[in-house]
Amino acid sequence: MTAVSASAPGKVVLCGEYAVLDGAPAVCMAIDRRATVKVTDFDGDWHSVAAPGYSSLEGRFVTDGAQLDWLQGGDEFVIVDAVWHVVANRLAQREGNDCLRIELDTRAFIDRESGEKIGVGSSAALTVALSAALTQSTDVLAEAMQAHHRFQKEAGSGVDIMTSVRGGLIEYRMNARSSSPLRWPAGLAYRVIWTGVAASTRMKLQKLADTRHRASRTELLKAAEIMAPAWRSASGVLRELPRYIEALRQFSIDHDLGIFDAGHDQLVNEAVDAGLVYKPCGAGGGDVGILLGTSDEHLDEFMSSRRASGGRVLNCMLETDGVELERR
């Protein structure tokens, strides 16, 4: 019996959200909440899928090449279908004819207090980890991009997949599917904040696609082009990010995306009053944001002072490592 485990990190988009779809750069950080996949050979009549913390149902399927025939659990494990379809040719080259037991673990992306999923790229991290575990390789960028695009019904920029594969802090451009590593700016303190409200990226992207082009979309693209190089220094980030936030706010209003809903708007304003910068980092309607300043103590004091106002610090940090693989 052989077992292969793979893991990949989640992400927080720091700037360039939505604008990345129009060719602007996005800056994104990997965080140390990881999706883990374990694949084990066993002698059976079907492949099985389990996802503790996500579903109590065991998925079962048989396959002929890229096509999966689900005996049960097909609606629960669509992501397995998407990845298997893309990596089928590489799977056909593996030794042996045993079935596979696939264990998917995204419990790191669930808030322990509320049981809600935290929107920090769990599906992308799982896609990358599953691609790596099935192919027994970390060279899975192309396959993971294709599989996640299939899973999201052709939506999304791919920045979350790139971040999960590469890890660290990256600048990403969708048109070339290219990334370059960045160093976290010296002297820039941060806290990732969760609003406690889950949101759907796919729904927001569909709403954007259904809305005619407005001037604020062009202005956001321009702001993203200015913001990306500002991530080379703490002073650059803190100087330019407020301007980017205002461009993002107008874009959200014009396209009815609700990016500043769920308490984000209040956090932005209160941070300004405290001499800090806060920016929502989700697609809109909830999820996460980032609080920035030059002092950890200042950030903690700010969050402590508003405990009753909503939003709390997530226990997560910048993750320097991307997808990882372990064979046993």
Image (cartoon, rainbow, N blue to C red):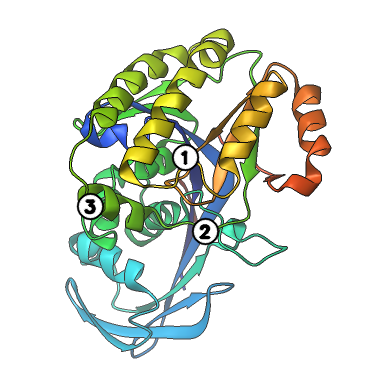
> What amino acid is at disc 2?
Thr
Residue tagged 1: 322
> What amino acid is at disc 3?
Gln
Q: Position of residue 130 (x, y in %)?
A: 39, 60
Distance between the alpha carbons at the discs numbered 2 and 3: 20 Å
Instruction: Using the image as rendered, state which of residue 85 and residue 113 is in the foreground.
Output: 113
Judged left or right of residue 35, residue 68 is left
Instruction: Mark 2 or mark 3: name the one nearer the start of the chain.
Output: 2
Judged left or right of residue 21, residue 286 is right
Instruction: Mark 1 or mark 2: name the one nearer the start of the chain.
Output: 2
At a point 56% along the width and 45% down the height, the residue shown is: 288
| Of the two numbered discs 3 and 1 in the rendering, the one whose residue sits closer to the viewer | 3
Residue tagged 2: 36
At a point 43% along the width and 43% down the height, the residue shown is: 164
Q: Secondary structure at mark 2?
A: strand
Instruction: Using the image as rendered, state which of residue 90 and residue 202 is in the foreground.
Output: 202
Residue tagged 3: 146
Q: Position of residue 240 (x, y in %)?
A: 48, 14
